[in-house]
């Protein structure tokens, strides 16, 4: 097994003799064999042990045992105790999830302090099979069946070549001591039930079941790579970034087959679920304006597009411009200048530039978002128009409306920034001085 261990590390380029590795060591057979193999191979390692305070004296005895073995092997040990029950209750999660979050959060924070570049975990082929079945029962997609990876980020798993039976044989042959965690026998936990009840029954029918699941997970990982490449190519072709929002034509999406798989592949980067993806597809037949939310993003079913924007917390919504101001950096980057109205002055034909009659303005001017009931007199029109009707006529999406800023003088709108000035503030023959406002970004 030692030679297979070294070959697995070399073939997968998991790490080399120059790397210093932090080992997650619980005291169980898997992590103790891993530490024995790493020390035997001469790798530079430190150990980290978590005491979750869930098993009273047994947990304390585990910590003392790991400390004793690390001393024998001359391995530096880091330990930490956690208030796991309190953590789980505060967040409304299971003890197993709480322990996992606490463990990995501490491991990653410990890496630089311990002078280590990688974290090594003692997962093996049996763990792959158990995780495969857990995810299968949970109803996961393709990625959930691709197994545990040999290396993911800073985490390496150099025992993934071995089954638990190999590890037990090695421990017996070389007298590697370990402790049994009594909670690992509690079949109320899903993983333990799969480990002690389901897999042994399946192995009666198929003795090499663990190997089969492991190789199946590897083939599914290859399939996921192909699927991911197709998704990324489709995303690059169909989605376009405009003003910090992604847009995709609904008509282009309709041509994809199978659409649910493609659309979920596109949307999961923004944390949308498969169920939400199906609701989005159903909304293709509905009226525009429906919105869908993930934890981080919002999707809008517009007239011809799906629009994805981030869910940003609202900041300031009112900004004032004094009469002597020359620039503004937020919420828009603008330049402000004054000009005499003489025959050589030409009003730029650019929607991002507003030329307003200074005598008609009341300072300070106000930049704000639009409000229900807003109205103005669009340049060239003789009557008033609701701003909401202006948006409809110009086919503004919900996101575009929310992104639009309004320049207000007194109680009147002077400019829909970047679109149209109010006719009452236009330059005329009677205008003496002009206020020019340019949107630079």
Image (cartoon, rainbow, N blue to C red):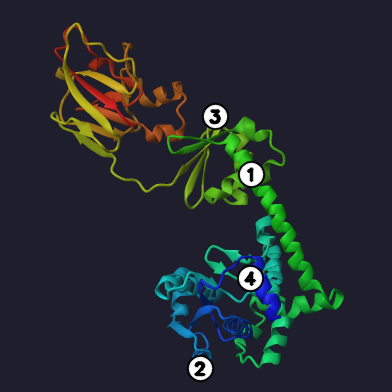
Residue contact between numbered discs 1 and 3, judged by CB atoms under 8 Å: no
Please tell me whether mark 4 sits on a helix, a strand or a loop.
helix
Residue receiving disc 2: 68
Of the two numbered discs 4 and 2 in the rendering, the one whose residue sits closer to the viewer? 4
Residue contact between numbered discs 4 and 1, judged by CB atoms under 8 Å: no
Residue contact between numbered discs 2 and 3, judged by CB atoms under 8 Å: no
Please tell me whether mark 1 sits on a helix, a strand or a loop.
helix
Of the two numbered discs 2 and 3 in the rendering, the one whose residue sits closer to the viewer? 2
**Image quadrant for the N terminus?**
bottom right
Residue receiving disc 4: 9
Tell me, for residue 303, which label it has, or none: 3
- The location of residue 412, given as percent across then percent down, is 24, 25
Q: Residue at x 37, y 48 (%)?
A: 313
Q: Quadrant of residue 323?
A: top left
Residue receiving disc 1: 231
Q: Residue at x 28, y 19 (%)?
A: 422
- The location of residue 226, given as percent across then percent down, is 69, 49
Give how far apart the Cα atoms at labels 4 and 2 are.
Answer: 27 Å
């Amino acid at each position: 097994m030692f030679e297979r261990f070294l070959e697995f590390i070399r073939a997968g380029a998991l790490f080399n003799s120059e790397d210093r590795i932090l080992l997650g060591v619980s005291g169980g057979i898997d992590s103790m064999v891993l530490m024995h193999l790493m020390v035997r191979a001469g790798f530079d390692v430190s150990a980290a042990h978590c005491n979750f305070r869930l098993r009273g004296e047994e947990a304390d005895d585990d910590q003392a045992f790991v400390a004793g073995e690390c001393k024998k092997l001359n391995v530096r040990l880091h330990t930490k105790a956690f208030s796991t029950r309190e953590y789980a209750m505060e967040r409304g999660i299971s003890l197993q999830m709480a322990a996992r979050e606490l463990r990995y959060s501490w491991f990653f924070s410990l890496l630089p302090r311990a002078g280590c570049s990688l974290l090594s975990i003692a997962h093996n082929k049996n763990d792959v099979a158990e995780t495969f079945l857990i995810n299968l029962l949970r109803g996961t997609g393709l990625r959930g069946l691709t197994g545990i990876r040999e290396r993911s980020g800073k985490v390496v798993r150099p025992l993934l070549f071995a089954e638990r039976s190999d590890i037990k044989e090695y421990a017996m042959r070389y007298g590697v001591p370990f402790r049994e965690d009594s909670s690992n026998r509690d079949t109320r936990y899903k993983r333990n039930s799969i480990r002690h009840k389901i897999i042994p029954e399946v192995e009666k029918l198929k003795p090499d079941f663990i190997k089969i699941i492991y190789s199946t997970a590897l083939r599914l990982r290859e399939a996921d790579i192909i699927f991911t490449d197709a998704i990324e190519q489709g995303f690059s072709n169909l989605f376009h970034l405009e003003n910090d929002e992604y847009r995709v034509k609904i008509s282009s999406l309709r041509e994809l087959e199978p659409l649910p798989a493609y659309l979920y592949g596109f949307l999961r980067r923004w944390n949308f679920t498969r169920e939400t993806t199906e609701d989005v597809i159903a909304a293709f037949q509905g009226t525009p304006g429906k919105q869908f939310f993930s934890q981080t993003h919002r999707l809008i079913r517009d007239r011809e597009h799906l629009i994805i924007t981030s869910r940003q917390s609202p900041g300031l919504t009112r900004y004032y411009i004094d009469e002597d101001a020359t620039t503004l950096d937020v919420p828009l980057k603008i330049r402000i200048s004054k000009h005499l109205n003489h025959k050589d002055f030409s009003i730029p034909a650019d929607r991002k530039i507003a030329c307003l009659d200074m005598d008609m303005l009341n300072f300070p001017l106000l930049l704000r978002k639009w409000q229900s009931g807003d109205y103005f007199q669009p340049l060239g029109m003789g009557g008033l128009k609701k701003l909401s009707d202006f948006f409809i006529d110009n086919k503004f999406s919900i996101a575009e409306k929310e992104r639009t800023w309004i320049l207000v003088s007194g109680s009147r709108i002077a400019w829909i920034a970047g679109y149209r000035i109010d006719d009452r503030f236009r330059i005329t023959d009677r205008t003496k001085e002009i206020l020019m406002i340019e949107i630079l970004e």
